[in-house]
Amino acid sequence: MARPEINRRQFLRAVAGTTAAVGAAALAGPGLGVANAANGVLIPRGKIGIQLFTIRNLVSSLGFRAVFEELSRMGYRQIEFAGYTSPAEPGITPAQIRQLLDDNGLQGIGGHRGLNNFRNDMQAELDIAETLGLPYIGTANEPVSSANRTVAGYQAAAEEFNRFGAAAAERGIKWYHHNHQNEFRFANDDPSVRLYDLLLSETDPKLVYLEMDIYWAHVGQHIAPGFEPADYVRNNIRRYPLFHAKDGERAQNTNGYNIVEFGAGDIDYAGFFRSIGAKGPHYSLYEQDNAPNTPAELGGAFGAAERSYQAMSGLRG
């Protein structure tokens, strides 16, 4: 693949100051407890990844090559995809992206795709996942529309997820679902049934895996109280190979939180990781929806990614 032309001055401006910006104030979120840590790391360094949606502006403007080089330098080891194209590298193929992963010591761990992608051409999605070496492929779509948050609606969604999981399993790939907050609501037609519990019970644990977005689970807890996010993982440890490590600062709004850099928020990540049990089965993927809005003087989205990696790798219990 021909190396794309990159404006190096622009690139250096984008990453300038990221290391210097990693300071005590940036890392000392109240949920971390890093300063008094004595019990070892809670997220193994070799299992810290990133969801590329976090730095989508940089994937778009710089391309996969430059982004992978910088993420590898920071210490990230896993990449979760949010698409397979970049305007900076027109025509790039999954095979070429795989080569860039390999060149930078990175592992493709998963990819978010819309439910209609799987409905329309499951095998094409699995072909791409196979080329990229992804052990997991899945969706961040809510299983049903808001109007169909019923017991029957979620039962039908679980049946569809089982079919997706079976098709993926035939290719040696595991299919997963990523939650937002609404999955934790109660069914429209039965206020005694939490929809996430129904999805968990109706899907085959050998076919359908789960990626807990810890931030959105806490938002779910805010809007529909009565559960602890960590309990789901502790009670179903092998169903949760992937986490989204997204931090939130408490706020007086509908969600109860605002998204912030990892380590700068109020979510008790140390408590979460201490309570779930074994660390080995899980990969923790940093995601921050608003990272592209990080000011240039703080290093932009790359600065947020570097500070968040340092906070994740320094998290101790």
Image (cartoon, rainbow, N blue to C red):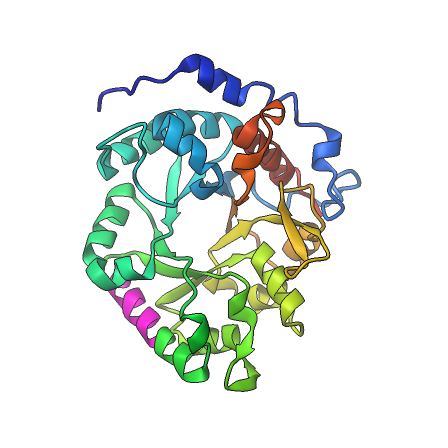
Please state which of residues 86 and 118 is positioned toward the viewer in this rendering: 86
Query: Which x, y percent locates residue 53?
Result: 44, 43
Compared to residue 70, the image places residue 214 above or below, namely below
Query: Which x, y percent locates residue 289?
Result: 53, 45
Query: Which x, y percent locates residue 207?
Result: 35, 67
Compared to residue 53, the image places residue 169 above or below, namely below
Compared to residue 250, the image places residue 225 above or below, namely below
Q: Residue at x 69, y 41 (%)?
A: 264
Q: What type of secondary structure mainly makes up the magenta span?
A: helix
In the image, farthest residue toward the top: 9
Please state which of residues 247 and 255 is positioned toward the viewer in this rendering: 255
Query: Which x, y percent locates residue 88?
Result: 32, 27
Please indicate whether residue 55 sits to the left or right of residue 184 in the image.
left
Please indicate whether residue 91 sits to the left or right of residue 40 in the image.
left
Please indicate whether residue 270 sits to the left or right of residue 240 in the image.
right
Q: Quadrant of the N terminus?
A: top left
**Magenta-tinted stretch:** 159-170
Q: Residue at x 45, y 83 (%)?
A: 151
The total of numbered circles placed on residues is 0
Can residue 280 be seen here? The reply is: no
* 169 part of magenta stretch: yes
Q: Residue at x 35, y 28 (%)?
A: 63
Q: Residue at x 25, y 30 (%)?
A: 90
Can residue 307 be seen here? The reply is: yes
